[in-house]
Amino acid sequence: MKSDRPTFATRKIILVGEAQKALIIAAISNAPIDPLRPLEVLLREEVKARGLDQNGLYWKRLGEIAEQAWFGGRQYSKEVWHEYAGRNIMPEQITTKTGEVRSKWEQSPDGKPCVISTTQLERRCFADYTTAVEAFGSGLGVQFSVNPKGGR
């Protein structure tokens, strides 16, 4: 049996005051009840997406590793370090922008595992990952710039 109701538009309400609380109550009071296509209500702390500065710092750090680190007798590009870090430094359990806690591994079309894109990581998870990349680089003797936007 198919539900006849139109698709329900997703709404995100950030609870910062009484006006938003009233809006949430009104939205729930007027929400359609449909056992065939039930709605999901999720109440949690706001999940912050990572910012451009955070992404810039991550790539700055990978660039500094690429410039200074020697591994196995050679140097690698920041893109290679990005791939390496995802597989070997990113924690096995990550938190996504949607708040989902899951494995970092996804299955590729050929059935082989690949690492989730860093663009899918929640802000704190991405910050922790960047810190782990810095620690790894420090272990290789990399001296990171004090000001990520400037010189050492």
Image (cartoon, helix red, strand yellow):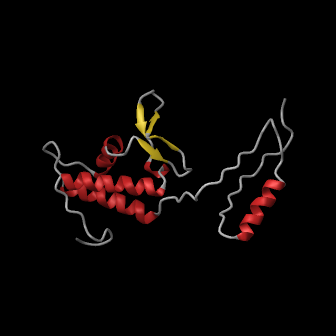
Q: Tell which of 2 and 40 is nearer to you.
A: 40
Spot the residue most to the left.
73
Is 150 left, or right, of 21 in this rendering? left
Is 106 left, or right, of 147 in this rendering? right
Q: Residue at x 72, y 66 (%)?
A: 20
Residue 150: quarter of image: bottom left
Q: Is residue 66 visible?
A: no
Q: What is the number of callouts on the image?
A: 0
Spot the residue most to the top.
111
Is 11 left, or right, of 134 in this rendering? right
Q: Residue at x 83, y 55 (%)?
A: 29
Residue 63: quarter of image: bottom left
Residue 32 in picture, x, y percent from top left: 83, 47
Residue 93 in picture, x, y percent from top left: 43, 42
Quadrant (top left/top right/bottom left/bottom right) for the N terminus: top right
Q: Tell which of 145 and 94 is nearer to you.
A: 94
Q: Residue at x 19, y 49 (%)?
A: 75
Residue 45 in picture, x, y percent from top left: 58, 58
Residue 24 in picture, x, y percent from top left: 75, 60
User: Where 52 falls versus 118 (above or below)?
Assistant: below
Q: Is residue 77 visible?
A: yes
User: Where 151 falls versus 121 (above or below)?
Assistant: below
Quadrant (top left/top right/bottom left/bottom right) for the C terminus: bottom left
User: Where 151 falls versus 31 (above or below)?
Assistant: below
Q: Residue at x 32, y 61 (%)?
A: 60
Residue 11: quarter of image: bottom right
